[in-house]
Image (spheres, rainbow, N blue to C red):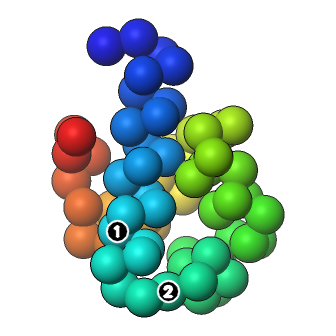
């Protein structure tokens, strides 16, 4: 899987998991301790979450690191 494809997959996974809980980007940001703009950047595929936030996303959204 290319890096670009992986970024898109992670972006989609975060967005879908958030929306399935009916949370706004601001609500997710608050729950994992980051800024809303960071969630937006991740969901648009501009950046991937750091290791610190990746762990928090996995726990908060109940997703697996290798989810596709």
Please report the residue visible at 63 percent of the width from the left and 46 percent of the height from the top: 44
Give the SS element for disc 1: helix
Q: Quadrant of residue 16?
A: bottom left
Please report the residue visible at 48 percent of the width from the left and 16 percent of the height from the top: 3
**Outermost residue, top side:** 2
Q: Quadrant of residue 25?
A: bottom right
Mark toward the start of the polypeptide (2 vs 1): 1
Rate crowding at label 1 as few (under 14), some (14 to 19) or many (20 or more) other CA atoms within 10 Å. Answer: some
Left or right placement of residue 2 versus residue 66 in this view: right
Q: CA distance from mark 2 to mark 1?
A: 9 Å
Q: Which residue is mark 1?
A: 17
Residue 11 at x, y = what percent? 49, 46
Please report the residue visible at 76 percent of the width from the left and 71 percent of the height from the top: 35
Give the SS element for disc 2: loop
CB under 8 Å between callouts 2 and 1?
Answer: no
Q: Which mark is residue 31?
A: none
Residue 27 at x, y = what percent? 59, 87
Residue 4 at x, y = what percent? 51, 19
Q: Which mark is residue 23?
A: 2
Left or right placement of residue 62 versus residue 2 in this view: left
- Quadrant including the C terminus: top left
- In the rendered view, would you say 31 is above or below 10? below
- In the rendered view, would you say 10 is above or below 25? above
Residue 1 at x, y = what percent? 31, 13
- In the rendered view, would you say 67 is above or below 55? above
**Frontmost residue, 47 versus 58:** 47
């Amino acid at each position: 899987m290319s890096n670009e494809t992986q970024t898109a997959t992670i972006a989609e996974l975060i967005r879908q998991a958030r929306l399935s809980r009916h949370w706004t980007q601001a609500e997710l940001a608050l729950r994992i301790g980051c800024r809303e703009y960071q969630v937006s950047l991740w969901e648009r595929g501009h950046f991937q979450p750091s290791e610190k936030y990746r762990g928090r996303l996995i726990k908060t959204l109940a997703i697996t690191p290798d989810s596709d």
